[in-house]
Image: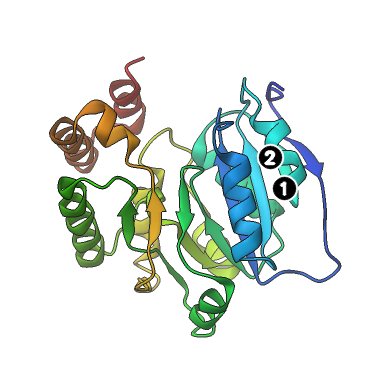
Amino acid sequence: MAAPRGRAAVVVVRLANDAPTVSVIIPTLNEAGHIADLLGQLRLSWPDAELLVVDGGSQDETVRQALPHSDQLLICEPGRARQMNLGARAARGEFLFFLHADSAPQFDQQSLMALLMTRPAWGFFPLRLSGQRFALRVIEAFINMRSRLTRIGTGDQMLFMQRETYRQTGGFDDIPLMEDIAYCKRLKTVAAPLVPAAPVLTSSRRWEEQGIARTVLRMWGLRLAYFAGVSPERLWYYYYGR
């Protein structure tokens, strides 16, 4: 199913009468390989959460596979920031969680609700990479240390916030890359992030396929270029090679 041009389409699958505490917003684009497994895992571990999939016009079976497992499935033109903002507008939860399709939280609903009882304005989680190589343990340790020191998380770390925080800060900038960093820079001017101990497991595929050292250098180069003022549009073309 192609994304409609100039507008968003909404397919409502299942809505409970009571507003949920947590809404999980998952932007997708050609994620047929694992979207059903992710949604099934979330349904088991967080049974009371609202699950929203926002697809950017996948050309594979992503929409068909996600539809039976979603509370809401939305379709819009591609762009991760655009997709997450659409999901946030449609979400009914008091807390909004933004989860990448190749990531999964590693804690249950009881731990989640205990965390939210502290009423954090926003936050993100430590990263754990899925691969077993020792070098990946070193990378994730540095990523987690850097994000705690800078108070800037990445999309792989499942950013979350109160709905009111999202409303006050205006959501993600509609840029093709670095939308997570740009948003965290604004969010930390409002409040310090909460960084719990429980991790989010993220696929290490890009590190293993492209080479660990090469991927690290490339990602650091992108971040340094962004902070030096290179536009997200130029960085997107460099990153995706288009």
Q: Amino acid at mark 2?
A: Ala
**Residue 9 visible in the current orientation:** yes
Instruction: List the residue tagged with mark 1.
Output: 69
Check the image and tell me how it is coloured. Answer: rainbow
- Residue 42 on image: x %, y %: 60, 57
Nearest the eye: 66 or 18: 66
> Up-down: is 116 above or below 215?
below
In the picture, measured across the screen, residue 180 lies left or right of residue 82, that is left
Q: Is residue 189 above or below residue 103?
A: below
Q: Residue furthest front?
A: 132
**Circle 2 sits on which residue?**
66
Left or right, 58 with respect to 173, comes to right
- Mark-to-mark CA distance, 2 and 1: 5 Å
The N terminus lies in quadrant: top right
Q: Can residue 183 be seen in this snapshot?
A: no
At label 1, the amino acid type is His
Q: For numbered disc 2, what is the local secondary structure?
A: helix
Q: Are marks 2 and 1 in contact (CB under 8 Å)?
A: yes
Looking at this rendering, what residue extends furthest in the right direction?
Answer: 17
Residue 53, position as x, y percentages in the image: 65, 44
How far across and down, in percent of the image, does residue 72 sit? 74, 48
- Name the secondary structure under disc 1: helix
